[in-house]
Amino acid sequence: MSNNTVKTPVSYPATDVYEDEIDLRGLILVIWSYRKLIFGIFLASLLMGAVISFAIPPVYQVQAKISIGNFALEQGSSQLQITSETAKEILLSTDLQEDAWGTGTDSGGLNITPVANTNILQITLDTNDPQQGEVLLNKLITRFDEKVGVQYERSKELNNNDLQYTKEELKEVNKSIKLIRDILEKLSKAEPSRTTEIQQAGQLDTLSRFTEQRDKLLKKKLESEHKLNSIEGIKVLEKPTAPSSPVRPRKKLNIAVAGVLGLMVGVFAAFTMNYFRRNPLELHRNE
């Protein structure tokens, strides 16, 4: 008895046949057929971009750069440093702007940017009138200098007074040291005795204390001189200047972007119209 094995034919999954292949020649023909539509939309977009760009009022940017110094902002402060953030808050404060410009002046275009790792501030003012912007920015910087500069002068005065006081102390200590040395010189010439030895020991101890005090005062004097010499006030590094060309709107860029968008919309419209022309919609009515 034999077993007959029936072989079942192996079926392979049918491969998808893509009938709608991209035909470059067909795309070009569609674009050529609707060239007037595409060109019309392109020109309309260019015109619209140009009209909008020329209709928008030009905005000029007046710039200035200042160094805010390194003095103490508050009286009695031991830290000789006004921070960039503090100066920024003062410049942006309503009180300072009204004091410099008066009430009713729009300051929405004022921007303060601290330069990294420095005590320098970049000040910009966006305005439709560059000459007026230059005047306004000059007034603001001048008023800021006047307001904060008072603290600079006060800080400098306090440090100078501290230096003078240290010098006076040092002068008195030097007088005392000279006096003690004169006494020791006289004692060294006197007849040796127990009393003389005790007096010499006492004077030497006093001389040692005064010498130590003098060294501390000399150190303090050097520190005070260095601090006084290192104090800097506000300096205008770059004066405000009225620019000759606006920063906004960028007319050429706006027109170019409008043209590109118009071209894209025109091509899209062309292919859409071509699709519905080849595949018309059929309305079925239920009878």
Image (cartoon, rainbow, N blue to C red):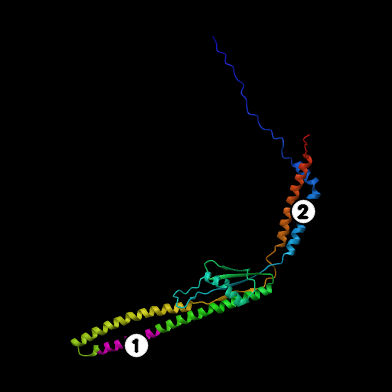
The amino acid type found where label 2 is placed reads: Phe
Q: Quadrant of the N terminus?
A: top right
Label 1 is placed on what type of residue? Lys
Q: Residue at coordinates 42% horizontally, 77% vertically from top-left? A: 223
| Residue at the (34%, 80%) spot, across then down | 213
Q: Secondary structure at mark 2?
A: helix
Q: Which residue is mark 1?
A: 175
Relative to 228, 35 lies left or right: right
Farthest residue to the left: give it: 194
Q: Which residues are magenta?
A: 167-186
254 left or right of 240 in image: right
229 or 149: which is nearer to us?
149
Check the image and name the residue furthest to the top. Answer: 1
- For disc 2, the marked residue is 42
Residue 73 locus on image (x, y percent):
49, 75
Given residues 162 and 90, the one toward you in this image is: 90
Q: Secondary structure at mark 1?
A: helix
Q: Is residue 94 magenta?
A: no
Label 1: few (<14), some (14–19) or many (≥20) C-alpha neighbours in 10 Å? few
* Residue shown at the point (19%, 87%) measured from the top left: 195
**55, 183: nearer the viewer:** 55
Disc with the residue nearer the chain's start (1 vs 2): 2
Callout 2 environment at 10 Å: few (<14), some (14 to 19), or many (20+)?
many
Q: Nearer the viewer, mark 1 or mark 2?
A: 2
Tell me where residue 273 appears, x and y as whole percent: 77, 45
